[in-house]
Amino acid sequence: MLAALAAIQFYHNPDQEALPMQAEQVTSLQASQWFGRGWQIFKVQPFIVASLTLFYIIVLAVTSLIPGVGALLGFILTPTLTFGFMEMSRLLSLPPEQRPLRILPTILFSALLADSQRRRRFLLLGVWYVLGVTLALLLSTLADGGTLAQAFLLGKPLTEAQVQSGELIGPLLIVMISYLPLLLAFWYAPALVGWAHLLPSKAIFFSIVACWRNKWPFTVYGLVALGWLILIQVAAGVVLSFLGEQIGVFFAAPFTITLLSVWLCSYYPSYVDVFGVPDGASATRVPTHL
């Protein structure tokens, strides 16, 4: 439905700019290397990348605490934060002599700190994201009567009995399946708005097209990421079993942050392989790095 709405708005706006590049079809071998290339980006400045990952999580956690609108605000900011992470990955992918000496946390908000047009487009993209998430959660009401939707959208806490009873497994599966099209829609959309200067509806449409054209490479990429996730979880379980829960969590947390950081960094090489290296001149000119 989100893709259909984006397509309708796109084709009813003939004055929009033309797509500046062609979405390429990549090989499964290329896609299998995205996670590894994300690791290469992470290794350039591991402390900076891990810190920004934590900052990313903290921003979403803090916004969720705002009564009434916290969850919605977090969803609205998600495309902005995603683009900020991709912009950081772009900077760290530059040759050593061109890399910034230091990257500031404000880079995560670079889209909102730029010109007013880009700011409006990213906020609108965030609204599109809220609509998609809301639709996925509304579908889950078919299984639980709205319990999960109220928890995510209204911040209504789940009881321990609800969590332990297993009654949320069905709704969660519905949300996961419903979220997959949304994931495709927003995999490239923030970058296409930020670097290619597309309108949100057009960026969503071409993100879906690009992901669908590369559905099998993306399947391979997902399997590789899943493999790493399982490996990290097994390693964390071994650490917890040997060191105990309290001490083990202290050592296991860095593994989780590293995995999440590498996954976020892998967005950029996937964009480069499909759409090409973005023009650095299109990046925001606000103080996001030194």
Image: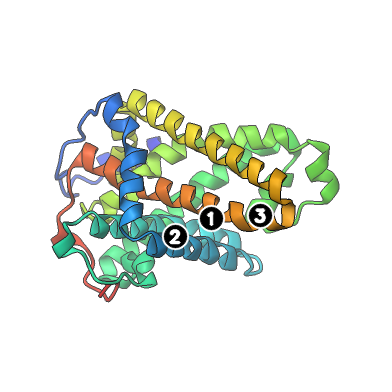
**Residue at point 52% right, 60% down?**
57
Q: In the rendered image, is residue 31 in sight?
A: yes
Instruction: Classify 10 Å Cα crowding around label 1: few (below 14), some (14-19), many (20 and above).
Output: few
Residue at the extreme front of the image, as rendered: 242
Quadrant where the N terminus lies?
A: top left
Residue type pointed to by label 2: Ala
- Is residue 259 depicted above or below 58 in this figure? above
Question: First in sequence: mark 3 or mark 2?
Answer: 2
Q: Is residue 253 left or right of residue 111?
A: right
* Foreground residue among 76 and 109: 109
The residue labelled by disc 3 is 249
* Foreground residue among 122 and 88: 88
> Closer to the observer: label 2 or label 1?
1
**Residue at point 29% right, 40% down?**
270
> Which quadrant of the structure image shows residue 120?
bottom left
The residue labelled by disc 2 is 50
**Element on which disc 2 rests:** helix
- Is residue 208 depicted above or below 127 in this figure? above
Report x, y in % for residue 35.
37, 40
* Foreground residue among 240 and 147: 240
Separation of marks 3 and 2 at Cα, in angstroms: 17 Å
Which of the numbered marks, if any, corresponds to residue 254? 1
Report x, y in % for residue 255.
53, 50
**Element on which disc 1 rests:** helix
**Residue at point 26% right, 66% down?**
117
Instruction: Classify 10 Å Cα crowding around label 2: few (below 14), some (14-19), many (20 and above).
Output: some
Report x, y in % for residue 261.
43, 52
- Is residue 64 depicted above or below 196 in this figure? below
> Is the C-beta separation of discs 2 and 1 under 8 Å?
yes
